[in-house]
Image (cartoon, rainbow, N blue to C red):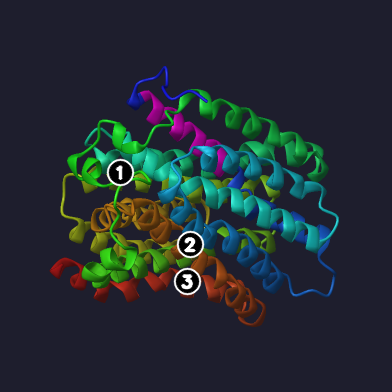
Amino acid sequence: MPKNSPLSPRKQLYFLTVVHTVIDSYATVLPHLLPLLLKKIASQTAARNSLAGIIISVYSTFSSLGQIFFGWASDRFQTLHFVTFGVAFTAIALSLLGIAPSLFLALVLLGIGGCGVAAFHPKATSQAAALARGERGFAISIFLTGGNIGRGLGPLAIMYLVVYRYGLESMPWCMSAGVLIALLIPKIIKTSPPAAVNVSPQVVAAPTNGSAKRKNLWGAIRPHLQPLLVLYLLSVVRTITGIGLENFLSLYLDDLQYSDFARSGVIGLFIFAGSMGIMVGGSLSDRINYYGLLLFSFIVSVPLLYFSLHSSGGTFLTLLFLGNFVLSSSTTINIVLAQRLLPEHENIASSFMMGAAWSIGGLLSIPVGILGDHFGLARVLDGLVMLPLITVVLVPLLKRK
């Protein structure tokens, strides 16, 4: 495995962004698949929304909570294997979902694919930051935007070009792109520790290899416990709303007799809006006050999302796009601020702001599904879009720090 890349740090960042696009194309195919998967593996008497909540929860547990472990591991072992095998495992396991004969095997595949997602993100995110050359917020926003473009458009390619044409059983063919990109990673991305790359002074000053003396994790967290908790809670609430809409909106549209093509189009638009919000918010995070952007994100997104659910046609699509655009615009701020608070444990900081927060949103899909079976998905979705307002009272605590 070469120690030097033939590409400049900026080009390596762009390639890493493409890798993120590819892996998240697989990682977010589940919302599109859910109605079809449930029809195949669920009994006629099963409570569909509750079962969907279990499926979402299992996948989120592995893909999100696993990021804490892999964040810890990648802080101690400077290797691209986390990135390479993460892409490969995700592509192979999730592509095999189409031929899973039972709920149990589907859950096993989701667990394996989730581990691949978890292995990839902490290491890849810190690598993107190290390649930033001083533009940390912009670099992370570009990296995250690549993933969100994959999340928005990648599943559409899988569904439109393969699944909706040839059926679920054709999905294994989709793994080829992920396997190919995994083989290219060690040839293109530099494998030396991130500190060797020309990055911001704060990052360079942080020890990044096993021989350097590292501050105890709790010792690093304790002085910044309050702002870290606030950042985490902001991420959790944003994620509960995002994951809830992303997955259960698909089932809700299926209940409304949307065609598979139209349903996937709406879900893809919703997720793509998030990618644009992350890109714009990330670039703004290097220029404007994060406090104002956080307040704007969590206040303005609520009426946009609420009224989208009570609209139709072009108004529905426009408000849905704008709502997730605004809600997602503060995502990069959470990650950058957490990494600044924990400069010697950046992978763990990233994993908590992404993985640990996303896992809570996924785990809460079980009660969301149960509530959906009892009260209807329309009422539950209305409640989900109101949640960001709860966090508005927490933002001033962050400002004081």
- Percent across and percent down for residue 301 are 35, 61
The foreground one among 28 and 187 is 187
User: Residue 76: horizontal and vertical position, in percent?
Assistant: 42, 50
Q: CA distance from mark 1 to mark 2?
A: 21 Å
Is 129 part of what is drawn in magenta?
no
Kindly report the secondary structure that dominates the magenta region of the rendered protein.
helix
Seen as rendered, the residue at the extreme bottom is 374
- Which residue is tagged 3? 384
Give left or right: position of 297 versus 287: right
Q: Mark 1 is on which residue type?
A: Val
Q: In which quadrant of the rendered image does the C terminus lie?
A: bottom left
Q: Residue at left 55%, top 46%?
A: 268
Q: Earlier in the sequence, mark 1 or mark 2?
A: 1
Mark 1–mark 3 distance (CA, rounded to whole Å) = 24 Å
Determine crowd level at label 2: few under 14, some 14-19, many 20+ residues with C-alpha closer than 10 A: many
Position of 277 relative to 135 (above/below) = below
Q: Do residues under tags 1 and 2 come within 8 Å of each other at their CB atoms?
A: no
Q: Position of residue 92 (x, y in %)?
A: 70, 41
Residues at marks 3 and 2, CA–CA distance in whole angstroms: 15 Å
Residue of label 1: 280
Which of discs 1 and 2 lies nearer the camera? The answer is 2
Amino acid type for the residue under numbered disc 2: Trp
Q: Residues within 10 Å of mark 3 (few under 14, many from 20)?
A: many
Note whether 20 is above or below 2 in the view shown: below
Q: Which residues are magenta?
A: 11-24
Of the image marks 3 and 2, the number of the one nearer the N terminus: 2
Q: What residue does disc 2 label?
A: 358
